[in-house]
Image (cartoon, rainbow, N blue to C red):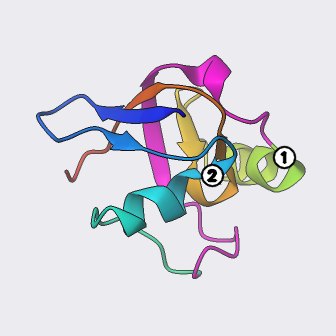
Amino acid sequence: MPFIRFKKSRPEIEVQSGANLMRSLLDAGLPVASSCNSDGVCAKCGIRVIEGMQNLSAPNVTEVFLKEKNNIRSDFRISCQTQILGDIIVDTGYW
């Protein structure tokens, strides 16, 4: 099973392969910014992927649109639109 690890000192989180990134973080008690209730319209749930980008689902049409519209860097993923397929290391500016 994949692990979510963090840039800063936090316990790692073990998740099911295919789990949603945002939901996994929220279930672990970590805050994730959002104003659209995971509907994929606000892009506030962007998470910086430090390692393991290849271990995430390919960006879907919604994520590609949101990243282009909001000028979001390539090392960020819209967490409500992203599934975890393998180990990753992530960070946000507010953890």
Q: Position of residue 46 (x, y in %)?
A: 49, 50
Residue at the spot 52% in from the left edge and 36% down from the top edge: 76
Q: Position of residue 27 (x, y in %)?
A: 40, 67
Which numbered mark, 2 or 1, is in the foreground of this view?
Answer: 2
Q: Nearer the viewer, residue 87 or 89?
A: 87
User: Disc 2 designates what residue?
Assistant: 19
The first of marks 2 and 1 along the sequence is 2
Sort mark 2 into few (<14), some (14-19) or many (20+) by Cα contacts within 10 Å: some
| Magenta region includes residue 82 | no
Of helix, strand and loop, which one carries label 2?
strand
Q: Nearer the viewer, residue 94 or 83?
A: 83
* Mark drawn on residue 60: 1
Q: Magenta region, mostly helix, strand or loop? A: loop
Residue at the spot 40% in from the left edge and 57% down from the top edge: 25
For the question of whether residue 44 can be seen, the reply is no
Q: Is residue 54 above or below residue 80?
A: above
In the image, taking residue 48 as reference, residue 22 lies left or right, namely right
To which quarter of the image does residue 14 belong? top left
The answer to whether mark 2 and mark 1 are in CB contact below 8 A is no
For the record, the magenta segment spans 37-59
Q: Nearer the viewer, residue 18 or 62?
A: 18
Q: Nearer the viewer, residue 95 or 67?
A: 95
In the image, taking residue 67 as reference, residue 25 lies left or right, namely left
| Magenta region includes residue 47 | yes
